[in-house]
Image (cartoon, rainbow, N blue to C red):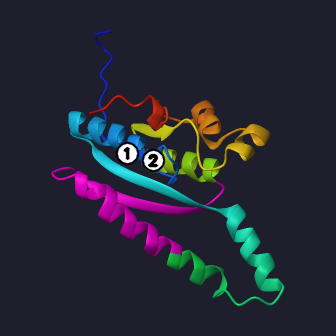
Amino acid sequence: MADCNVELKRVAAAIDFSDYSEITFAYALEEARCHGAELVVVNVINARGLDVLDRLTAEGYDLGGKQGYLERVEAERREVFEKDYLSAAKGIKTRVVILNGHPHEELLKFLRDEEISMVVMGTKGRSNLAGALFGSTAEKVFRRAPCPVLSVRGPEHCRLP
């Protein structure tokens, strides 16, 4: 046990704007604060939505194209993160990373590439039906993550003041 040093350098908060997002961020923030770690808020624009966008564009709807859509969504999400989340992280090194693709694949790649020490994520995301049918993003990340995963239950289980 003497050789076991746990040092958290980067804590990721996987935020999907579900009901679990606020409590997920609160736990990640506290972990980062307690360990003097960088807090990285990560969000994935789901590829399933982009596939629908391609079909609508093919049918003649002008939605500004995939790149325009991604730029708009990323700007909107960054604004929400800055205003509603990072404002609570005073004194902590923070950054926001927004990816696009299949959430579990993008998150796992991100965790490896960024050498994340711990990821905090909700046990359920925005789509409970898809999770029931195909396995949730959280479940896939729990099984394959290269770092510890702190699983956060929903707000109905929260006892924070």
Amino acid marked by disc 2: Ser
Pointers 1 and 2 in contact (C-beta within 8 Å): yes
In the rendered structure, the answer to whether residue 27 lies left or right of residue 97 reads left
User: Residues under labels 1 and 2: Cα distance?
Assistant: 6 Å
The mark total stands at 2
Residue 68, compared with residue 2, is above or below; it is below
In the rendered structure, the answer to whether residue 130 lies left or right of residue 92 reads right
Question: For the N terminus, which image quadrant?
Answer: top left
Q: Residue at x 31, y 64 (%)?
A: 82
**Residue 115: percent from the left, percent from the top?**
42, 44
Q: Secondary structure at mark 1?
A: helix
Is 129 in front, or is 65?
A: 129
Amino acid marked by disc 1: Phe
Q: Residue at x 48, y 40 (%)?
A: 121
Is 96 in front, or is 59?
A: 59
Mark sitting on residue 126: none
**Residue 118: percent from the left, percent from the top?**
41, 36
- Magenta residue check for 150: no
- Magenta residue check for 74: yes
Specify the segment rendered in magenta: 73-102
In the rendered structure, the answer to whether residue 83 lies left or right of residue 14 reads left
Residue 148 appearing in the image: no
**Residue 72: percent from the left, percent from the top?**
51, 79
Check the image and name the residue furthest to the left. 91
Residue 16 appearing in the image: yes
Question: Label 2: few (<14), some or many (≥20) within 10 Å?
Answer: many
Question: For the C terminus, which image quadrant?
Answer: top left
**Residue 136: percent from the left, percent from the top?**
67, 40
Check the image and name the residue furthest to the right. 59
Pointer 1 residue:
25
In the rendered structure, the answer to whether residue 3 lies left or right of residue 97 reads left
Pointer 2 residue:
21
